[in-house]
Amino acid sequence: MKKRLMSLAQGLADDPAAVRVTADAPNEEGTTVYCLHVGEGDVGCVIGKQGRIVKAIRAMTCAVGTRSDAALPLRKGSRLPARSRQYEIWYLLLLEALHLVLPLNWSDDSVFFQKASRLALPQFLNGSSRVWIDTLTWCFAKQPIFWRVLNPLVLLLLAVLLTRLLRLRTQSQKIVLSLLILYPAMVMADAGFMATTLNYLWPFAMGVFVVYALLDCKPWRVVLAIPALLFAANMQQSAVGLLAALAILVFFFLQQKQSRKALLAAGYGVLTLASLGFLYYTSFFGENPRFLRETARYFPNFAALSLLQKVELGFSSTFLGFSSLTNRATAASALLCLFLCAAALRREEKKWVKILAFVPPGLLTAIALFRLTGRNTRLWQLLSPAVDPKLSHAVYRFSLFETAAALLLLGVILLLLLRLVRTRKRQALLCGILALGFGLRLLMGFSPTVWASGCRTFFPSVMAVIVCIMMMIEEWNALRINSSSCGGKPSATEC
């Protein structure tokens, strides 16, 4: 294919010596991108009037690629640098300027400052199950300037890693992703900026780095992934999420017959499982002063709950957070519902799908308004049962009405995802990411602070929503590029 493109372009160009063709490595779907480079004076000759010549070249290469089971979209013009750092520099400078003025004297941050000022590190860690996180908390409470400098770097790291994992192509997509992750990382920081980021943002970013290191498999990244893994596994939600991601990677590598990567991912999984076991033991067994203190303060009868009641507690509290106007996590569920509605109206041709697209935003709005305005009505008393006496200090209202509404909302969202995403792998991946994000928040039902913990516990769930939205945008952008590259054919498998 290279020779054919080269000979064709040389016949059109006035300077054949400047013509060259490069090819990227095939991606996971087997698509190879060929880039045609010509001299500045020959760009118009290759493009042609209204792009007719370059369209003909694309159609020819696509036809040849289809017969040889290869996908060959062609990019015109000079290729921009693949890893432009301009937006990253401005993003980092903006974050550094913002962090210099952030207040750190409120909520849990002020408590940590007081404790660190009068306690040495061993006393500060007494009763702590998150040893690595609390060690950094003590250090940053002593010198907050280090957190102000390092936290923007972690935000930038997370943005860059997600950009590469999701294969975002355009600058606008990268900027949108970089701005979106600021919402769960900073706006939802209801326990203090430093405490929230160290317990949620940093473990999540380290877990994403572990996944990226396994996929990239460069030796130095594989080595750095070990301390990153230990830090990510030092927090319950991120440890469970990382363990699930590693299990999926083991299955993926075995399917691709990459036994070396599968073995490495399995080793990381064992290390994560060991860290999770230590975290669970130190949190819930023995005379853990923090656990006993939190149980006595927030949920005295927590130990009396059965396993089913804890699952119900996690489910009801999670759905309440995603559909309550007083919880900032509702913005993520509203964004997902509106995005799916707009995408279905634009991309779907069947009327029933377009009508169904209005159900998620309409149902979410109705539930939120009903909870806000209908608490003193007779309908509310009929649909919401009384608080269980055993569940003192907990707003526990797991009613049949709320369960049915939650299941209906989740079912319609999944159906729209299956309709809007064409490939089965993408469908499974998107549904899995959303289920994992929802499940990680459901784990809060096993903690006595399930109702005391604010919207920060929705961090992995909100990040799952952001990742799914960006994945769909990138897939549609790729389909649009491939369609134009193949002379207007819409099928992704042909392009």
Image: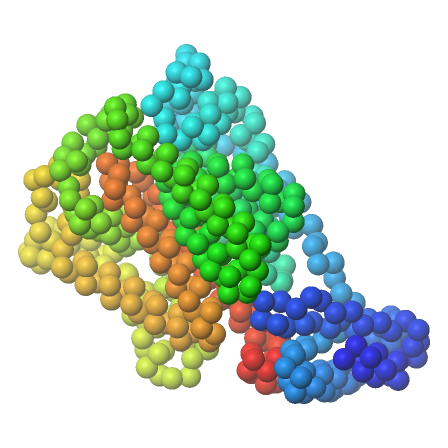
| Percent x, y of residue 129 | 37, 29
**Residue 145, picture quadrant:** top right
The residue located at (41%, 37%) in the rendering is: 275
| Percent x, y of residue 231 | 48, 36
Q: Is residue 149 above or below residue 155?
A: above
The residue located at (76%, 65%) in the rendering is: 79
| Percent x, y of residue 263 | 52, 52
The residue located at (79%, 77%) in the rendering is: 2
**Residue 494, picture quadrant:** bottom right
Q: Visible in this render: residue 42?
A: yes
Quarter of the picture containing the C terminus is bottom right
Q: Is residue 239 left or right of residue 54?
A: left
Q: Is residue 215 left or right of residue 238?
A: right
- Which residue is situated farthest in the top direction here? 118
Q: Is residue 301 left or right of residue 141?
A: left
Quarter of the picture containing the N terminus is bottom right
Q: Is residue 299 above or below residue 60?
A: above
Q: Is residue 256 left or right of residue 343?
A: right
Q: Is residue 177 above or below residue 2?
A: above
The residue located at (37%, 55%) in the rendering is: 436
- Viewer-proximal residue among 161 and 306: 306
- Viewer-proximal residue among 48 and 493: 493
- Viewer-proximal residue among 424 and 255: 255
| Percent x, y of residue 30 | 61, 72
